Image: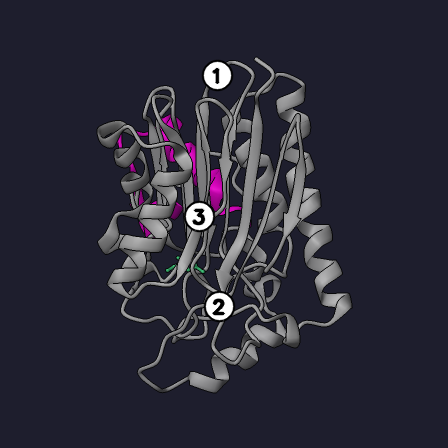
Amino acid sequence: MNNFGIAIHGGAGTILKSLMTPEKEAAYQTALAQALDTGYELLEQGKTALEAVEAAIVVLEDCPLFNAGRGAVYNANGQHEMDASIMDGKTLDAGAIAAVRNLKNPIKLAIKVMEHSDHVLLIGEGAKEFADQFEISFESDAYFHDALRYEQWQEIKGTEKFQLDHSKSGKKNLGTVGAVALDQHGNLAAGTSTGGMTNKKFGRVGDSPIIGSGTYANNATCAISCTGSGEYLMRAVTAYDVSCRMAYKGLSLKDACNEAIMDRLTELGGDGGLVAIDHQGDIQMPYNSEGMYRASRNARERIIAIY
Ligand code: ASP
């Protein structure tokens, strides 16, 4: 099968070209390219979609530019609580973790949940206890400190506000990350990883670790990873919505994505987007926000885009 491919995102939101410097733009493009090519090269070697998704997400989690892993935003207590999920389109197996602190690569623990537990979603201290059985890396709080993200939190600390990593001010140029892939064996996979929203409290968890909302994969239809306002993506069950529109209405990936984002999510009042790949290798990356850090690659083309 030579129609294998991968698509990744680094978050959607108010990303305005007018507020971007050429240096910053280049840094985002370089990071996206590195993650994209890491995943694509594995697919070229015949590795699985799951391996490609994991590898691409690890690169993005290790990059402080994105709101996942190292770049996770501050919650209301000044901590970094991370969420992640993975789904295998072949078996419909899935694994996820939520509100876990100090994890270097949250996606790796989500994969362990999928592969080595009878559960789908583990949270907080329990998820950490589960991680003890494996070689999972933890980092000190200092590893997750970033001056810009700290400043973003200071701006709304002590208020009832919580916000997407891309705020209206346009200063929040960070983002949840995700990847979807189709491998040479015809299998699909999807994964998503995030620090959630700045100043989130009460153990708030968004769509990213919720199978069907932020992440979904099914070999019969498509693989999806979402980004944007989690409360809306959860209510719209966006990732599963795309798959259902293909399965039940017989829509193409493009039409299913457009209906899920441009119609349903938009009507509910949500901001965001997704990356998608179907069982034939078609790739779509729709969003209803000003921008979405995104990239895709297959045998025909290699795209890296922001606006
Ligand atoms: N969807 C994520 C959340 O609500 C945020 C994002 O995509 O940036 O936690």
* The N terminus lies in quadrant: top right
- Amino acid marked by disc 3: Leu
Which contiguous range is marked in magenta?
Answer: 104-129
Q: Is label 2 in contact with label 3 (beta carbons under 8 Å)?
A: no
Which numbered dot is residue 186?
1
What's the amino acid at mark 2?
Asp
Q: Is residue 248 left or right of residue 283?
A: left
User: Which part of the image, by quadrant, shows the C terminus?
Assistant: bottom right
For residue 148, which quarter of the picture?
bottom right
Find disc 2 in the rendering and name its residue.
Answer: 165
Chain-order first, disc 2 or disc 1: 2
- The percent coordinates of residue 234 (x first, y second) are 27, 53
Residue in view at x 63 percent, y 52 percent: 305
Question: What residue would you read off at disc 3?
Answer: 274
Q: Main secondary structure of the magenta part?
A: helix
**Residue 268, how many percent across, how many down?**
24, 62
Q: Is the residue marked 2 within 8 Å of ligand 1, measured from its CB? A: yes
Relative to 24, residue 154 above or below: below
What distance separates the C-alpha of mark 2 from that of mark 1? 34 Å
